[in-house]
Image (tube, grey):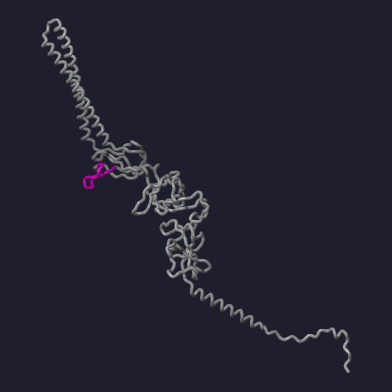
Amino acid sequence: MSSPKSPLDELRIERRPERPSRFQPWLAVVVIVVLLVLGAGIWWRSQAGAVEVQTAVARDVNGGGDSERTVLNASGYVTARREATVSSKVTGKVTEVLIEEGMKVTNGQIVARLDDSNVKANLEVAQAQLASAMAAVEETRAQLKQANAEYERVTELAKRNIESQSDLDQAESTAKTLQAHLAWQETQITVAQRGVEMGQQDMDDLIIRAPFDGVITTKDAQPGEMISPVSAGGGFTRTGIGTVVDMTSLEIEIDVNESYINRVEPKQPVEATLDAYPDWKIPCKVIAIIPTADRDKSTVKVRVGFDHLDPRILPDMSVKVAFRDNGGTEAGHAVIVPKSAVLNRDGRDVVFVVQDGHADRRAVTVSDTQNDDSVLSAGVTAGEKVVVNAPANLQDGMAVKEKSL
C-alpha cells in the first residue's frame, strides 16, 4: 500500500524533458550565402544588360548668382555707327599723307594733300582775269565821267544856240554808250570773281580733311599714288586715304533667329562678353530691333548699345550676349548642356537624364543654340547628368552605366 502524497507534492508542476531544437547554426550561414549569391547574380545580370553611355553635367546659365533670368543667348560683332572712308572729291596724285593707324583726328583736320600744280595755275589765271576786268571798269568809269561832263557842257551851249543839235546828240550818245559798256564790264567782274572762287574751291578740294572726330583704323594710300572718288585705272587707283571711326558710336550688331525675336524688346537689359575678355561682363541695353527680316538667314537684326564705353572695346570684335529678364521669378532655371545631348524623338526635343542607374527621358525646351552648347529653359535642372551622344536603342527606363566625359 502506497503512502499518501503530501499536499505540497500535489501542488508541484511536473516538467517534461525538452526536445532538442531543430534550428542549427549552419542553417543560418547557408541562408546568408544563398541570399548573397542571388543578389550578386541579380546585380551581374543588371550590369551585363546595362547600356554604357557618356554623360555631362547640366550647367546653370547664370552660374547660380544672378537675380535676372537669361531668356536668350546670341552672338554678334562690335560695329561703329559712324565710320567713313576718307577720300577726295576729285581724281589726283597724293603728295602728302598726314595720318597713321591709331591716330586721333578732329573734325576738319587735314589728313592728306593732292598735287595742286594745275589747279593753282588755273586759279592764278582766274585771279589775273579778275584784275584785268576791274582795271577795265576803272578806265571806263573815267571815260564815262568825261563823257557826262562833255554832254552837260554841250547841253548848256545848245541852249544858247552856240552848239548845234547834232553835237548835242553826239555827246548824249557817247555818254550812254559808255554807261552801257560800264554795266557790261561790271558783270564781267562778277564772272571773274566766280572764276576765282571756283579755283579756290578746286584748291580746297585737293586738301582732304577728316569728316568728324574719330580714330584712324586704316591707312590706304601713300604719296605718289593716284586717288579717285570712284574706282578707275584697272585697280591701280586708290579710292580712299584711310578709314576713320567714331569710337563713341560703337555698338553691338546681332542677328537673332526670328523664332526667338519675341524674347527681345527695346531697352531690354543685356550682358555682353567679348571673346577677347571672357571674364569681363559688360552691361548693355537693346537700342532697336530693325523692322525687317533676312529671308535667306531667317534672322532679325538687333542693335545693342553699351551703357559705358571702354578703350578695350574695338570695332569688329566678336561678342556673346545674354538677353535678360528683370521681372522673371524663375531665375537660374535655364541650363546649358552639350548640343549632342538633345535628341528629336516623335517630333519633340528630349534628353536622357541618368537617375539611379537608369535613363530618364525628359521633354525639354531649347531656347538657344550656339557653338557646341544648347540652352534649355525647361526640362532639366542644373547639376543633373545628361546622356551625350545617346545610342539609338536607348529607351526610357533602361539600365545604363555612365561614363563621365
Q: Is residue 141 above or below residue 297?
A: above
Say whether residue 403 is magenta.
no
- In terms of image quadrants, where is residue 136? top left
Tell me where the magenta segment starts and ends, as one range. 228-240
Q: Is residue 198 above or below residue 251?
A: above
User: Which residue is most to the front?
Assistant: 346
Q: Is residue 388 above or below residue 161?
A: below
Seen from the viewer's position, the closer of residues 294 and 29 is: 294
Q: Give the percent coordinates (x, y) of residue 69.
A: 49, 52
Residue 158 showing in the rendered view = yes
Q: Quadrant of the N terminus?
A: bottom right
Q: Give the percent coordinates (x, y) of residue 70.
A: 47, 52
Position of residue 216 in the picture relative to residue 397 (left or right)? left
Seen from the viewer's position, the closer of residues 106 and 166 is: 166
What residue is at 41 percent from the left and 54 percent from the top?
259
Seen from the viewer's position, the closer of residues 360 and 273 is: 360
Q: Give the percent coordinates (x, y) of residue 133.
A: 19, 24
What residue is at 42 percent from the left and 59 percent from the top?
372
Q: Is residue 115 above or below residue 303?
A: above
Number of numbered labels in the structure image: 0
Position of residue 245 in the picture relative to residue 231 (left or right)? right
What residue is at 23 percent from the left and 46 percent from the top?
236
User: Which residue is most to the top?
Assistant: 160
- In terms of image quadrants, where is residue 144? top left
Q: Give the percent coordinates (x, y) of residue 23.
A: 67, 83
Say whether residue 239 is magenta.
yes
Residue 276 showing in the rendered view = no
**Main secondary-structure element of the magenta-colored stretch:** loop
